[in-house]
Image (cartoon, grey):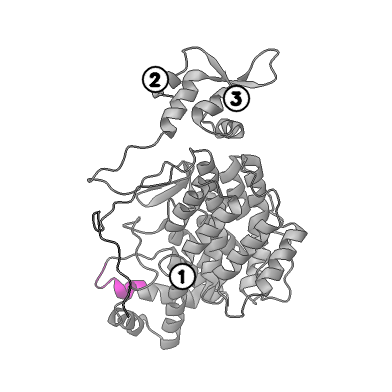
């Protein structure tokens, strides 16, 4: 059917089935568009189903059609999203200042609002016992040296295997999966504190799996805020992987697993761990100068500094540093971080990023260096789910770029057998 033939007549109203066919989606996705404010519906008198304005549906269909191929002037992949906007030195979740939102609401409240558009004060995510037990057993079978992302990925796979309804990609089902998957990831991690207990705010559960110290209210608030600050950050590499998986209609557990696989790369999730070790080195040697010199002498970038999307201060780091300043035990690590920034400022104008702020939080809380990676992965799972939901509402397999072949041109001779 051509675009001209697909254009509905003016004034006509479409049934759910007709709207779905025109948009190239499932009927339940049409209602997902309604819940997100992208379509309006109306129930006619004596009718059991909703109807949709034909012109409005056609307008949305045009938006969802494939973007023009990238030209030589712009070869970067561009994906439409309504989740996060980064503008100068600020970033916004669905148009709301993300730092203000994270300071005022818990991680679970921010995640729920990001998925549904409804702010539900006091909401708690709970892992079903059967799912949590399966994830714990799988994680406990891993070698002792396994990293945090190894454990989280195995937990996600175990949770998927325990869910026979995982292939239901309706918005309601995916959000239900998200509410149970995130606490399952946390509860599957081996506890560090003997006084741990499951249930309660997610940040409290996560603390017991990262630190053996008794937390203060200010420390828990800083951890919870850090989770909310890290929920999403536009199309980071792991988020793009999630959208590619969702475009192929992988279920949400598989989409999250794709994100975790990319996050494990040393250029993505491991950055806060490098900054953590650097701060411990600065505290041990009493000054940032020799530590920074060693980093530069080895040809490495000083970890925790600079961000390609923020020419100035990283707003996530600013918000987290402000919370850490009122925590007495964070004082030495904060001073070490400031020493690093001041030392490098003699030669370059690089500002502290969120990885340095996370390093201060983890180093001052008795957490291991890889704790920042764990925190980042748990936090970002909520954003990955939001992107998966958005991608499930798009045309399937649209995240399929064409390769630019640069190999030998055919015809080429058949390869000869190896004579050795």
Earlier sequence position, callout 2 versus callout 3: 2
Whether the magenta-drawn stretch holds residue 286 is answered as no
Q: Position of residue 341 (x, y in %)?
A: 35, 71
Pair 2/3: label in front? 2
Circle 1 residues within 10 Å: few <14, some 14–19, many ≥20 = many
Query: Residue 270's mark?
Result: 1
Query: If you read the primary sequence from the N terminus, does the residue marked by circle 2 or circle 1 appear first?
Result: 2
Q: Which residue is found at the position 30% from the left and 73% from the top?
A: 344
Find residue 16 and name its label: 3
**Image quadrant in which you'd find residue 32:** top right
Q: Which residue is mark 2?
A: 4
Check residue 159 in the rendering and tell me which mark sits there, or answer none.
none
Q: How many residues crowd around disc 3 within 10 Å: few (fewer than 14), some, or many (20 or more)?
A: many
Marked residue nearer the N-terminal end (1 or 3): 3
Q: Quadrant of residue 300?
A: bottom left
Name the residue: 44% across, 52% down: 240
Give the alpha-carbon distance from disc 1 to disc 3, as whole Å: 46 Å
| Residue 393 relative to residue 85: left or right | right
Residue situated in front as seen by the camera: 67 or 293:
67
Viewer can see residue 225? no
- Find numbered disc 3 in the image and state the secondary structure of the residue it sits on: helix
Q: Position of residue 152 (x, y in %)?
A: 59, 65
Magenta stretch, residue numbers: 341-348
Q: CA distance from mark 2 to mark 1?
A: 51 Å
SS under mark 1: loop
CB atoms of marks 2 and 3 within 8 Å: no
């Amino acid at each position: 059917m051509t675009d001209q033939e697909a254009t509905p007549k003016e004034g006509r109203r479409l049934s759910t089935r007709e709207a779905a066919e025109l948009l190239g989606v499932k009927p339940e996705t049409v209602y997902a568009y309604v819940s997100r404010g992208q379509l309006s519906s109306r129930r006619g008198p004596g009718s059991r189903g909703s109807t949709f304005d034909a012109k409005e549906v056609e307008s949305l269909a045009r938006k969802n059609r494939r973007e023009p191929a990238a030209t030589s002037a712009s070869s970067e992949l561009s994906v439409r999203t309504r989740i996060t906007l980064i503008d100068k030195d600020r970033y916004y979740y669905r148009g709301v200042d993300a730092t203000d939102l994270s300071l005022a609401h818990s991680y679970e409240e921010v995640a729920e609002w990001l998925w549904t558009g409804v702010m539900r004060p006091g909401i708690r995510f709970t892992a079903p016992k059967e799912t949590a037990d399966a994830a714990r057993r799988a994680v406990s079978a891993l070698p002792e040296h396994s990293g945090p992302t190894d454990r989280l990925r195995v937990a996600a796979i175990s949770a998927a295997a325990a869910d026979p309804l995982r292939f239901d990609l309706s918005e309601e089902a995916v959000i239900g999966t998200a509410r149970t998957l995130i606490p399952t990831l946390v509860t599957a991690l081996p506890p560090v504190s003997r006084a741990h207990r499951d249930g309660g705010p997610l940040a409290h559960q996560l603390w017991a799996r990262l630190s053996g110290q008794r937390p203060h209210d200010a420390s828990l608030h800083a951890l919870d805020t850090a989770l909310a600050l890290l929920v999403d950050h536009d199309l980071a590499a792991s988020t793009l992987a999630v959208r590619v998986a969702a475009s192929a209609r992988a279920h949400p557990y598989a989409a999250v697993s794709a994100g975790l696989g990319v996050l494990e790369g040393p250029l993505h999730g491991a950055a806060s761990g490098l900054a953590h070790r650097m701060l411990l080195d600065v505290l041990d040697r009493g000054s940032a100068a020799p530590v920074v010199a060693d980093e530069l002498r080895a040809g490495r970038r000083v970890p925790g500094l600079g961000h390609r999307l923020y020419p100035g201060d990283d707003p996530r780091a600013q918000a987290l540093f402000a919370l850490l300043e009122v925590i007495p035990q964070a004082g030495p690590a904060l001073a070490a971080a400031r020493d690093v920034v001041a030392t490098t400022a003699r030669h370059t104008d690089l500002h502290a990023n969120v990885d340095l702020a996370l390093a201060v939080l983890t180093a001052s809380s008795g957490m291991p260096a890889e704790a920042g990676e764990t925190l980042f992965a748990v936090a970002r799972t909520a954003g990955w789910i939001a992107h998966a939901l958005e991608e499930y509402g798009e045309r399937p397999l649209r995240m399929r770029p064409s390769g630019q072949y640069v190999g030998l041109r055919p015809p080429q001779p058949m390869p000869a057998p190896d004579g050795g």
